[in-house]
Image (cartoon, rainbow, N blue to C red):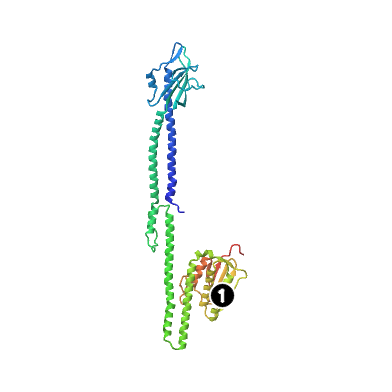
Amino acid sequence: MRVSIRKQLLILFMPVLIGLFIASAIVSYWLVSSYSSESFDKDLISSADSVVGRLRVKNGKVTADLPPAAIAILKHDVSDRFYYCVVGSDGERITGDADMPEPKSNLQLDEPQLATVKLNGKEVRIAQIKVDVDEPGGDTVIVQVAETTKVRSLFQQKLLASIAIPQLLVLIVGLIAVWYGVTKILTPLGLLQAQIRSRSQSDLSAVSDAEVPEEVLPLVDAINTLLSRLREDLKAHQRFIANAAHQLRTPLAGLKTYSSIGIDMNDKEDLKHVVKEIDTGIDRASRLVGQMLALARTDNSEQNTSQKTQVDLNFVASDVTAELVERAVLKDLELVYESSQEPAVVYGEQTGLRNLVSNLVENALLYTPNGGKVKVQIKKGDHITLRVLDTGTGIPEEERSKVFERFYRVDGTSGSGSGLGLSIVREVANAHNAKISIDSPSGECGTIISVDFPKLNGKK
């Protein structure tokens, strides 16, 4: 499942903003409710104190001098219903509304208490205070005042709206800013996509990093590194195709020439000579095609790691040597094979290893003069070593680093080689983490090519 960077960023930021808005709204509502309730409660206690101030003692009884005008003053808003009641120390109502609830029994002198209760089906806020009437003959009374909560509820709602609406606008602006920011951040990726998509299949030039952010620069560098490798591989393949076409042209031209001559020939001996040359040309072309296919397989060796297994080089070298004995006999060469005393097991791909051994031995047979000697050895020490020795003319030291290049041949070399054999050997060796070295026998002509393979872990 593909993951969208845009969605991930929005999923990351949007819940945070929405969560902050919700938390801020809750805190704001709590603060508004607390502060407004406290303010209204103070006004309600002030009304209770006003009632206390209107208490009088007449004829030994406590009365409240509260005409309608005074009661109207005690109301904070005409939208709310106002209640009051004065209760004597004996629990009898002195004055006020009869439907007020019974006062609390735990009231302390001059300490007001507040509560929210239901009165006639409506929610009211009630303040109660116990006082001594400061006049001769005065008594201890309880003053109750109450009002409905309609005004305070409306006030809290308006105050909350005045806070929440700006916060909601800030949230919307924040979400728009996040969306714009995410789009702005991803714009370089869109430009990079458009730049790559607009290219032709042959355009492997480096991608421009002029407006690329620092975080995306490693990605562009990786793409450019890949494109650079692809350019080099493409050039190598183009050179390979050009060289292969050139190499194939020579034997095919020879075959065409001899076949054209052979058509008009009547002499049997001359015709036999032409057929022999044609046969030689076909062998050369077949060998060249075979080496090109082997080289193509070694180029894909990294993709064939699943085919690697444990291979004993003794058996591979023995089979290859046995197959080439006839070729050695035709050139009057002595072909010798020496195996190691113990199994020489390496981890590799058998077809590739066979190509490596075959090309080394075939090269030795090809460039060793008639009557010479070629020896194939397998040795086991710190490494598993394949060694091919011949008594040919040898490879000059200054040429040894070049002979592994494709289609390269040492100047003045005789024989019908294609220049691909040692290239195949190098590619196979690299695929098996093996090292190649070229030496000459001390005091003698010839060449010694050694390939050192790492031993398997745990093998002795």
**Residue 31 visible, this angle:** yes
Res. 403 in view: no
Q: Position of residue 34 (x, y in %)?
A: 44, 30
Figure quadrant of residue 230: bottom left
What percent of the width, then of the height, locates residue 346?
Answer: 57, 66
User: 427 or 157, which lies in front?
Assistant: 157
Drawn side of residue 348 relative to residue 114, left or right: right
Disc 1 residue type? Answer: Thr
Q: Residue at x 48, y 70 (%)?
A: 295
Say which quarter of the image contains residue 456: bottom right
Badge count: 1
Q: Residue furthest front?
A: 121
Question: Eyeballing the image, is 389 above or below 123?
Answer: below
- Above or below 295: residue 158: above
As drawn, 335 above or below 180: below
Q: Residue furthest top?
A: 59
- Name the residue rendered at 43%, 33% in the picture: 31
Coordinates of residue 161 in the picture (x, y in percent): 39, 35
Label 1, on which residue? 321
Residue 49, horizontal then vertical, whole percent: 43, 20
Q: Which quadrant is home to the C terminus?
A: bottom right
Q: Residues within 10 Å of mark 1 (few under 14, many from 20)?
A: many
- Viewer-nearest residue: 126 or 31: 126
Mark 1 secondary-structure assignment: helix
